[in-house]
Image (tube, helix red, strand yellow):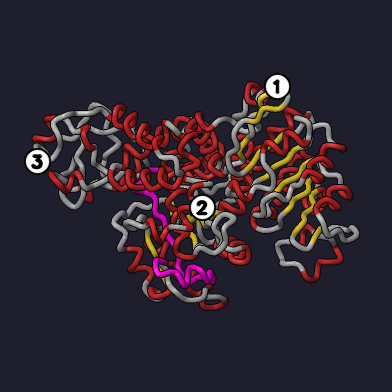
């Protein structure tokens, strides 16, 4: 191996995109080696002594061997005991379980990530069902609300209006060069919690942790970014601990120009194939940004497209229980924002492709309720553009219960961001004209869910097929245990991202989202169905992500949008080989 990592040829990198430890375009050769080969802990120079222990990418804590301690000037800097990574993991999980406050667990995990990257990801991968609610919804919501108070050191890039005109220079300040995935937010609509401004950084950080843990994208290829254009949250503006710009949000042309400079700088600095995931933008900006940049950049909006794909997967899987096709259903949504309209559009597209019916016709099976009531034709002139396709002929209905009784849906989907809106009357109405009503309460965090799992099962006398956005514990009802499914975007975006990167995709298309949905639905087993689940358990998430990546990659090649040629013979094996491994490496 060359003594200078920058001298490794492009041909070498392109021909060796993956190895035993995973990763794509691994310019340092770190994971191209087999497990019994020695690797060099590259930083600016070879890390040793205190520098090595302070670098989270290479720090192994008490797992450094005597030979490594001697070779890297660590002798005396650590206690004499040597603990394996497995023992360290056991110790960390024991410590985490002592915390009774979820936010304390979150802080402890973030501290570990900043101290020992590989141990953090090993914990997350091996204990995904236990730790997912900590690093993601619901705990990440509270973390964002209190981000100013728990802030320790930057975990991503903060690009504020003060950097207008020099965003490219700011991007160059990030130490890693081979960025493959960027998750960016402007903090205006964090989960169901509203405008949290600069404190929304917890969302990109959490999402990218899951890109690595669940999808195998190497941490050094991930970049969390917060765009700070101000906040309209008066509480934050008056908070002495707030870490962002203390001014009202930029809007209109000023906002559009700033985001355009950002998107151009990203492409200039990282190239055509960097995936930019928009996260938790307000509705009007989310749709505009996706529409504006989908033809020129590799962009994806998780709130619109990721949510749609994971919900569609659950609906496809549920048909095996119900013995119906999607076209046999009538859908009613509470919520007509990014998530609601995104899900509705993907359902309509799927039905259109299955039946050969024009999408304008398949949309008529889908009804949406917003804050003003059922979206109907008489309201069309006053509707935002993304709601207009869902304005069907019907008399106005102001309340959800009235809409349920009028439309008689077989599927009820909540994306409103408002808790307790699926009342007992609404759920019981669903149960009167459906033998097995399909109820999805998708709003996050848990406090904003339209109804709880217990309410759904109890009010339908155990007949509901239920899934939610945030996790709920199993429910006992009349001697039977029900296991609520979680329509969590984590099922989709890590595998989707891996598939896009693996194939060298240059654009994202709806057909790729459909491929991801179908791949996820195919992972649900008869045993899962028997437990009332329409999603597979998270314990198999890396296998699930590999299959999703393979399906997305296959569709990318089929559409002619792949640049990593020739196409691998076995895309599932390729996906598995590309996945980052958190196992400690041995240093020479």
Of residues 378 and 557, which is closer to you in this image?
Answer: 378
Nearest-to-viewer mark from 3 and 1: 1
* In this rendering, position of residue 527 left or right of residue 225: right
In what element is the residue under mark 3? Answer: loop
* Residue pictured at 74% horizontal, 47% vertical: 422
Dot 1 or dot 2: first in sequence order is 2
Over which residues does the magenta segment extend? 217-242
Quarter occupied by residue 246: bottom left
Q: Secondary structure at mark 2?
A: helix
Q: Position of residue 273 (x, y in %)?
A: 45, 53
If the image is split into quadrants, where does the C terminus sit?
top left
Looking at the image, residue 514 sits to the left or right of residue 501; the answer is: right
Along the viewing direction, whichever of 349 and 397 lies nearer the viewer = 397
Looking at the image, do the residues carrying marks 1 and 2 touch, with CB atoms under 8 Å apart?
A: no
Can you tell which mark lies on residue 73? 3
Count all numbered tags in the image, as a single digit.
Answer: 3
* Residue 581 visible within the image: no
| Residue to which mark 1 is pinned | 479
Cα distance in 3D space between marks 3 and 2: 42 Å
Which x, y percent locates residue 338? 64, 57
Q: How far apart are labels 1 and 2 at the CA level?
A: 35 Å
Mark 1 crowdedness (10 Å alpha carbons): few <14, some 14-19, many ≥20: few
Residue 533's x, y, as percent? 65, 30
Residue at which label 2 appears: 141
For marks 3 and 1, the one nearer the N-term is 3
As drawn, is 62 to the left or to the right of 460? Answer: left
- Place of residue 88 in the rendered image (x, y in percent of width and height, measured from the top left): 29, 31
Q: Residues within 10 Å of mark 3 (few under 14, many from 20)?
A: some
Residue 337: which numbered mark, if any? none
Q: Is residue 309 magenta?
A: no
Residue at image location 84% in from the left, 58% down from the top: 392
């Amino acid at each position: 191996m060359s003594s200078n990592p920058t001298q490794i040829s492009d041909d070498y990198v392109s021909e060796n995109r993956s190895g035993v430890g995973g990763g794509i375009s691994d310019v340092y050769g770190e994971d191209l080696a087999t497990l019994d080969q020695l690797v060099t802990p590259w930083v600016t120079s070879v890390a040793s002594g205190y520098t090595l222990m302070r670098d989270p990418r290479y720090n192994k804590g008490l797992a450094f061997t005597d030979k490594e301690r001697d070779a890297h000037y660590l002798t005396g800097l650590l206690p004499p005991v040597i603990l394996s990574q497995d023992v360290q993991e056991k110790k960390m999980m024991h410590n985490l379980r002592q915390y009774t406050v979820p936010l304390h667990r979150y802080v402890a995990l973030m501290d570990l990530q900043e101290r020992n990257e590989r141990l953090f990801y090993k914990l997350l991968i091996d204990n995904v069902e236990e730790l997912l609610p900590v690093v993601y919804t619901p705990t990440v919501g509270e973390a964002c609300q209190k981000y100013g108070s728990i802030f320790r050191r930057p975990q991503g890039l903060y690009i504020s209006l003060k950097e207008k005109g020099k965003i490219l220079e700011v991007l160059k300040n990030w130490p890693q060069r081979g960025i493959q995935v960027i998750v960016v937010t402007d903090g205006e609509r964090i989960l169901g919690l509203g405008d949290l401004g600069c404190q929304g950084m917890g969302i990109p950080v959490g999402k990218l942790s899951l890109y690595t843990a669940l999808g195998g994208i190497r941490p050094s290829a991930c970049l969390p970014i917060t765009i700070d254009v101000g906040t309209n949250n008066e509480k934050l503006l008056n908070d002495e601990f707030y870490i962002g710009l203390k001014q009202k949000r930029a809007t209109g042309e000023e906002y559009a120009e700033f985001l355009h400079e950002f998107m151009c700088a990203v492409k200039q600095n990282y190239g055509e194939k960097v995936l930019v995931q928009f996260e938790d933008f307000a509705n009007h900006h989310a749709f505009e940004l996706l529409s504006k940049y989908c033809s020129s950049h590799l962009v994806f909006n998780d709130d619109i497209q990721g949510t749609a794909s994971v919900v569609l997967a659950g609906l496809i899987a549920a048909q095996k229980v119900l013995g119906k096709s999607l076209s046999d259903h009538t859908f009613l949504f509470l919520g007509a924002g990014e998530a609601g309209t995104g899900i509705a559009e993907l359902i309509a597209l799927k039905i259109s492709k299955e039946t050969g019916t024009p999408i304008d016709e398949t949309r008529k099976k889908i009804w949406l309720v917003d804050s003003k009531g059922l979206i109907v034709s008489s309201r069309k002139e006053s509707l935002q553009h993304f709601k207009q396709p869902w304005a069907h002929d019907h008399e106005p209905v102001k309340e959800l219960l009235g809409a349920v009784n009028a439309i008689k849906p077989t599927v009820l989907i909540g994306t409103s961001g408002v808790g307790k809106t699926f009342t007992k009357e609404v759920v019981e109405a669903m149960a009167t004209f459906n033998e097995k009503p399909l109820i999805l309460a998708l709003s996050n965090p848990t406090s904003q869910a339209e109804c709880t799992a217990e309410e759904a099962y109890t009010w339908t006398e155990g007949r509901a097929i239920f899934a939610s956005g945030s996790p709920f514990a199993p429910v006992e009802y009349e001697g039977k245990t029900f296991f609520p499914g979680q329509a969590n975007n984590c099922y989709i975006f890590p595998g989707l991202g891996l598939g896009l990167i693996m194939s060298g995709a240059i654009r994202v298309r709806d057909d790729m989202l459909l491929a991801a949905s179908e791949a996820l639905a195919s992972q649900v087993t008869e045993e899962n169905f028997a437990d009332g689940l329409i999603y597979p358990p998270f314990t198999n998430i890396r296998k699930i992500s590999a299959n999703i990546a393979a399906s997305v990659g296959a569709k990318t090649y089929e559409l002619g949008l792949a640049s990593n040629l020739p196409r691998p013979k076995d895309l599932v094996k390729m996906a598995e080989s590309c996945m980052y491994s958190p196992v400690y490496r041995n240093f020479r």
